[in-house]
Amino acid sequence: MHNIFSDSNQIGTVSGFSELVHTDFKGERNALCWYRNLDGDFNEIVAKLKIKENITEVYPKDLLALQLSEKGNIAREIILNDLRLLTDFGASPALNLLKCYERDDEFDFISTDVYSFHVDRSPIATDTFLCTYHGAASDIISNAQAKQKILIPEIRNKLAALHDGPSEEFEDFLKENYFDLHYQALPHAVPVNLGLGHLWRLAVDHPQQQVLPCIHRAPIENKGEYRLLLIC
């Protein structure tokens, strides 16, 4: 199967949900994509949902309450099926209608919000699943094209100045404040946009992980447009 992601060593492509969840990450591969060209009118769903705050969780009952056209109904069935597949697998998917995420502007030299390239971390073996149905889509970047921000000398020195405890506790300070999860793209880096409709599985930093965690970021939203995102 050839598609726009097939030529990347970082990304494996699969043709169905079972293959998505049962294919192992290995080597440089820390992202798997169930590549799909979805039919249906997802814009109609977004237009009929009510956004209550910057991030509004949408439940199956909210989708089922919408009066939709034939194309809108196709889109709804796709979303409900994705939620069902992930729930049956044992994941806890959430469907979010997004205006924007909260920005972190506490420090001018390092950002720890989701618009910054970052990895996810968990104390247990798990993966991140996501699919953007409408709006701007997330980016990933290969680990070779990014550097952990806490290893950049000028950032590390400023973080050390913030830390008022013993030097042997500095690494714990970095981890407790999630500074160690964030990355700076190198000048030659070429991020990969995850596109619309594809269901992704990204490697997470956890104790049993055999590969490097997948570095990713949320996109800057398109002006006047909400995102519809499945994530878990």
Image: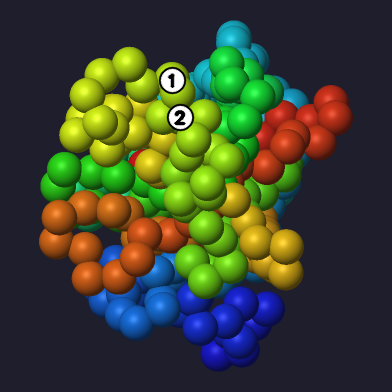
Please name the residue shown 45% across and 44% down the image.
150
Measuring from the top left, give residue 160's x and y in whole percent: 41, 29
Percent across and percent down for residue 6 are: 58, 84
- The numbered disc on residue 159 is 2
Q: CA distance from mark 1 to mark 2?
A: 5 Å
For label 2, the SS is helix
Q: Amino acid at mark 1?
A: Leu
Q: How was the colour assigned to the protein in this rendering?
A: rainbow
Q: Is residue 191 above or below residue 80?
A: below
Q: Is residue 231 visible?
A: no
Identify the residue at horizontal 73%, vertical 37% (top origin). Answer: 220
Extreme residue toward the top, this view: 52
Residue at image point 52% right, 46% down: 153
The residue lying toward the viewer, choosing from 175 and 204, is 175
> Pointers 1 and 2 in contact (CB under 8 A)?
yes
Which residue is identified by label 1? Answer: 162
**At label 2, which amino acid type do we have?**
Leu
Residue 218 position within the rendered picture, expressed as x and y whole percent measured from the top left: 60, 41
Within-10-Å neighbours for mark 2: few <14, some 14–19, many 20+: some
Question: Observer-nearest residue: 73 or 154?
Answer: 154
Q: Is 201 on the left-hand or right-hand side of 194? A: left
